[in-house]
Amino acid sequence: MEVIVQATPDDVARVAADVVAGVVARRPDAVLGVATGSSPVGVYAELARRVADGRLDLSGVTAFALDEYVGLPPGHPQAYAAVVARDVTGPLRLDPARVHVPDGGAADLEAAAEDYERALADAGGVDVQLLGIGGNGHIGFNEPTSSFGSRTRIKTLTARTRADNARFFASPDEVPLHCLTQGLGTILGARRLLLVAQGEAKAEAVAAAVEGPLTSMCPGSALQLHPRATVVVDEAAAVRL
Ligand code: F6R
């Protein structure tokens, strides 16, 4: 695993954007795995700047989100379909027809999970998967005890994750209890993993993922199994390394 410590969150964003841009330079029709939440926001902003000033063209890229809440009303602004459209598809000028998010509103969620796995396989798999990490070590919404072999499926969010994500909702009760998430096995199938983390609140999870034992109690430790994983953190997120 490659661990890159940068001085500031802006530097983290630049380094991670360089990795994504490098993949797309080699393969303009690359498949990009996108994370939501706060961690990748700076990376998307940096990529958007490069697209806006003509240094980068992402119009041939296909994108797959990691996860989606289950049970939000259609069109809810915090549904990851809405977040990805707002923060990724638009600013990065991706082709909306090639941007995929698990269908958390499906009547048959198991079928939706299988469909998502099929769509990923049909696209040829992910070239570079951007990841954040939860304070409890989750990646995607693979909460502690998730199997390393898991595929896209329904998961129950832990109380900690619901509390952490309450900041995006009007009230903590509004945070859904369930989600559809790519499994750890699905994520490990990407050809390259790129995890970004900023701030001291992530320091413990980063240290457990990078230097701790390989354990389902820290799903991020699954990165240790991947032949090409890059972790880019700022100094605050690196204090426990
Ligand atoms: C979101 C996701 C999660 C987040 C994690 C960190 O698609 O997959 O694993 O990356 O919860 O969230 P932030 O970045 O908001 O701290």
Image (tube, rainbow, N blue to C red):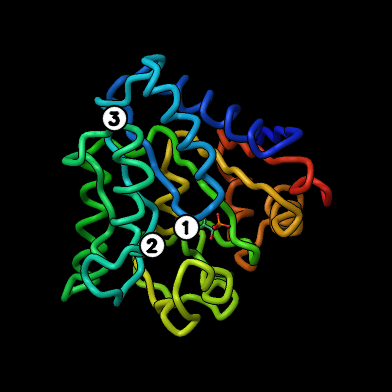
Q: What is the three-letter code of the residue carrying label 1? A: Gly
With respect to residue 95, does 106 lie above or below?
A: below
Q: Residue at x 39, y 42 (%)?
A: 33
Q: Residues within 10 Å of mark 3 (few under 14, many from 20)?
A: some
- Say which residue label 2 marks: 181
Q: Quadrant of the N terminus?
A: top right
Whether the residue carrying mark 3 lies under 8 Å from ligand 1 is answered with: no
Whether the residue carrying mark 2 lies under 8 Å from ligand 1 is answered with: yes
**Residue 230 as seen in the image, left or right of residue 95:** right
In the image shown, does 70 or 55 lie closer to the viewer?
A: 55
Residue 61's label in the rendered image is 3
Are the two marked residues, 2 and 1, in contact with CB atoms closer than 8 angstroms? yes
Q: What is the three-letter code of the residue carrying label 3? A: Val
Q: Residue at x 44, y 34 (%)?
A: 128
Q: Residue at x 46, y 28 (%)?
A: 20
Residue 86's label in the rendered image is none
Residue 77 locus on image (x, y percent): 32, 63
Residue 140's label in the rendered image is 1
Residue 97 locus on image (x, y percent): 16, 41
| Residue 127 sits in quarter | top left
Q: Residues within 10 Å of mark 1 (few under 14, many from 20)?
A: many
Whether the residue carrying mark 1 lies under 8 Å from ligand 1 is answered with: yes
